Amino acid sequence: MKLSLYEVAKVVGAKNKIEEFSDLELTGTEFDSRKIKAGDLFLPLKGERDGHDFISKAFENGAVASLSEKDVEGHPYLLVDDVLKAFQDLARYVLDKTGVDVIAVTGSNGKTTTKDMIASVLETTYKTYKTQGNYNNEIGLPYTVLHMPQGTEKLVLEMGQDHLGDIHSLSEIARPKISVITMIGESHIEFFGSREKIAEGKMQIVDGMKAGTLIAPADKIINQYLPENQKIVRFGPNEDIYISNLYSHADYQTFDLNFMDRELTVPLPGKFNATNAMLAAYVGKLEGVTEENIKRGLQEDLKVTGNRTEWLKAANGADILSDVYNANPTAMRLMLETFQELENNPGGKKAVVLADMKELGENSKMYHSMMITAIDPEKIDRLYLYGEEMEALVEYAKDIFEKGHLKFYRKDLDKDELDDLIKDVAEDLGENDQILLKGSNSMKLSEVVKGLLPQD
Ligand code: IGM
């Protein structure tokens, strides 16, 4: 949506004299200076490095203004105490101003597929936008809001939780009209301590809702946290909404729903995808989508997010955490931390494959070598590094990994050892192991993942 500098200044409570600058139209917002386009507002967030160090880079790349926690020379800026908070306030403002309907989705597994299915159903009838990739945290959610196209009527937002309270803040920003909890699982139980706490965290999805609808599993664990001022719809056998006559095929499911006349088909494997589709169909009903369109949205038009972080099963049973489509230092560090915190599978070890992060500019080698501070050899049994930039990390990693536990593969003008990497990773991987792969798309780590998956 179109925002002007003065308008944003008001929303974020800019503390500097903005009258010094003339008002101007902002075309977009970015926190990664590599992505800045002419006319954008830059948001210097804290990651591996402090975004404030990149303000001049952002202006070079065409930014017309920046938020900032300190004074900026020679360019329009808005002085605030906390850039992240300002960014979130701005997202809240945009939601108010546009009046878009927000559908929020959380759950341990299946939230991404469910989000995609809901968006696919709504898209048949409304101008719809949804969370891209894994942009489901305190930065990703406001980013999604600020990137929704002009005229969006329905916004489907994924909400992730690493810690108790995360979903509370996200719900306060998003103020959902409909909230969907796909399941109460066990992910990040190491931070939460118990499934109760996970349930409590998920249920905070209603904290920002006025009068709306909560769709939640029949799982008793959430009963103690149910809100009083919302319409509540539970799903499961003999509940408010449920599946019957389910026929599960290798790559599609057919089933009936107690609130629809037609039989439905989803072109995805796994019974849980019938449940995800039921949730999407129900949201469609609530929003006035016809049965015909619901069916079409789930069956013909369904596109599920492929390019994101995903857990996959290797042919030998090992767990693969694949995040092979883009990379920046912050995201790589977060992923390493998350992966290392996971409990090992019984009798299993952990392996990590890291490939070059592209377009990091003149300090690229430094960013790569700094990853050493995010790697704990007590937790990682084998480290595979691949690419010219990653070679900078080898220098440091070889001091902390024993011989044979660190392997380097070249990719430069003269040589590409991708095939050796694929072969070694597959050979070394035990059936109880967990393996993380991360790097920029152009490094083709997707080929390594492919080499581990069951061949069809
Ligand atoms: O984990 S994230 O990717 N995230 C995004 C939002 O949705 C959920 C997932 C993430 C987060 Cl949580 C926070 C930040 Cl601050 C990513 C970032 C992020 O983009 N960090 C970045 C950097 C750091 N540290 S982007 C980036 C850097 C690009 N920058 C280098 C440092 C490029 C650059 C290189 C050289 C130059 O001269 C100028 C720019």
Image: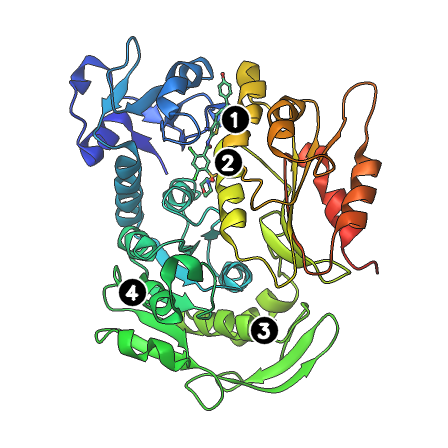
Identify which residue is drawn at 43% across, 87% down: 239
Query: Which image quarter is the N terminus in?
Result: top left
> SS for tag 1?
helix
Q: CA distance from mark 3 to mark 2?
A: 35 Å
The disc at residue 206 is: 4
Q: Give the image quarter of residue 207.
A: bottom left
Indicate the position of residue 82 as horizontal and vertical percent values.
25, 32
Q: Give the image quarter of residue 292.
A: bottom right
* Residue labelled with disc 1: 370
Mark 1 or mark 4: whose residue is earlier in sequence: 4
Query: Which image quarter is the C terminus in?
Result: bottom right
Which residue ends up furthest to the front in the rendered image? Answer: 402
Identify which residue is drawn at 32% across, 60% down: 176
Mark 3 or mark 4: whose residue is earlier in sequence: 4
> SS for tag 2?
helix
- Crowding around mark 1 (Cα neighbors within 10 Å: few <14, some 14 to 19, many 20+) is some
Give the label, 1 or 3, closer to the camera.
1
Mark 1 or mark 3: whose residue is earlier in sequence: 3
> SS for tag 3?
helix
Identify which residue is drawn at 52% across, 43% down: 335
Mark 4 or mark 2: whose residue is earlier in sequence: 4
Q: CA distance from mark 1 to mark 4?
A: 40 Å
Q: Are marks 1 and 2 in contact (CB under 8 Å)?
A: yes
Q: Nearer the viewer, residue 444 or 29?
A: 444
Q: Is residue 231 above or below residue 86?
A: below
Q: Residue flagged by tag 2: what amino acid is it? A: Ala
Mark 3 or mark 2: whose residue is earlier in sequence: 3
Q: Residue flagged by tag 4: what amino acid is it? A: Val
* Residue labelled with disc 3: 272
Q: CA distance from mark 1 to mark 2?
A: 8 Å
Give the label, 3 or 2, closer to the camera.
2
Q: CA distance from mark 4 to mark 2?
A: 35 Å
